[in-house]
Image: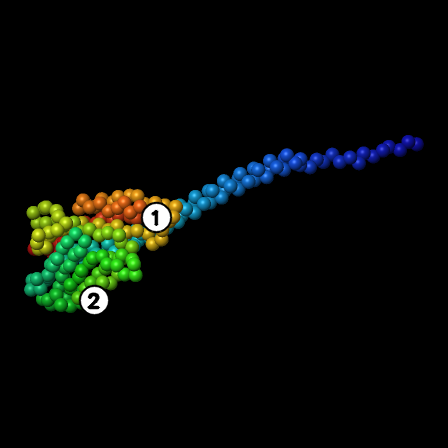
């Protein structure tokens, strides 16, 4: 009887070298694309976080100034002679008879806002009756402008008489805390008073914020 020969030849096929190289190339391309997308998202996230911190810093300082400047001239007894004491383009000093006792000698009744530098950082500072030195309100403030509207509706950065002020527009320019070496800020920021801030040509992001304050206790 004749025995049949078994065919031990495998019908399964492996990958050829060319197929392996193609697979490696495709994997590399996909990985590179994913890495690029990740880097882009990371940069976007960092930029958004930087801007969010800047805006938060700006609003905190602005809200505090607006709240207090709005009360300038508050004088329920009419004996304290409260009002705006001095006003220039980047500084304002005013008084409030907060306690209603007919004088402006109590704490937080004589207030000044201006910029100052401490630890190589420019800050929005606040002085009051009880603090002879500036107290920091917001940090990394590049510029500050007070643009005043007078009783005759004219507007100026330098009022001839502070008692003529009825409202003002406050503008602040803040920058981020850290430089981004892959970002260059070549922007120029124009204020309501016509000042141009910049270009700084550095690696800091910046945001400009302007708010109008009506001093309801002035000119009564």
Residue 211: where, in percent of width, then height? 21, 49
Residue 182: where, in percent of width, then height? 39, 46
Give me the residue at 85% from left, 33% from top. 5
Q: Quadrant of residue 162?
A: bottom left
Q: Secondary structure at mark 2?
A: strand
Residue 126: where, in percent of width, then height? 21, 61
Q: Nearer the viewer, mark 2 or mark 1?
A: 1
Q: Secondary structure at mark 1?
A: loop
Q: Which residue is mark 1?
A: 203
Q: CA distance from mark 2 to mark 1?
A: 35 Å
The reply to whether residue 64 is visible in this rendering is no
Give me the residue at 29% from left, 58% from top. 121
Q: Nearer the viewer, residue 182 or 18?
A: 182
Q: Mark 2 or mark 1: name the one nearer the start of the chain.
A: 2
Disc number placed over residue 131 in the picture, else none: 2
Left or right relative to 218: residue 189: right
Residue lying at the far right in this picture: please name it.
1
Q: Residues within 10 Å of mark 2 (few under 14, many from 20)?
A: few
Residue 184: where, in percent of width, then height? 34, 45
Q: Is residue 177 above or below residue 39?
A: below
């Amino acid at each position: 009887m004749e025995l049949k020969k078994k065919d031990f030849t495998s019908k399964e096929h492996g990958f050829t070298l060319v197929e392996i190289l193609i697979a490696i190339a495709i994997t590399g391309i996909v990985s590179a694309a994913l890495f690029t997308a990740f880097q882009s998202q990371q940069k976007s996230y960092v930029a958004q976080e930087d801007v969010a911190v800047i805006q938060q810093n700006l609003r905190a300082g602005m809200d505090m100034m607006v709240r207090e400047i709005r009360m300038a001239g508050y004088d329920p007894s009419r004996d304290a002679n409260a009002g705006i004491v001095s006003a220039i383009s980047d500084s304002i000093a005013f008084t409030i008879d907060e306690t209603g006792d007919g004088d402006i000698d109590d704490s937080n009744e004589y207030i000044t806002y201006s910029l100052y530098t401490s630890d190589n950082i420019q800050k929005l500072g606040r002085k009051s009756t009880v603090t002879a030195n500036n107290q920091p309100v917001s940090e990394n403030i590049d510029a500050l402008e007070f643009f005043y509207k007078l009783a005759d509706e004219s507007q100026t950065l330098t009022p001839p008489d502070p008692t003529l002020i009825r409202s003002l527009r406050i503008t602040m320019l803040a920058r981020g805390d850290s430089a981004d070496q892959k970002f260059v800020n070549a922007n120029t920021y124009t204020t309501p008073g016509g000042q141009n801030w910049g270009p700084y040509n550095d690696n800091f992001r910046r945001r400009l914020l302007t708010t109008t304050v009506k001093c309801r206790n002035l000119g009564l």
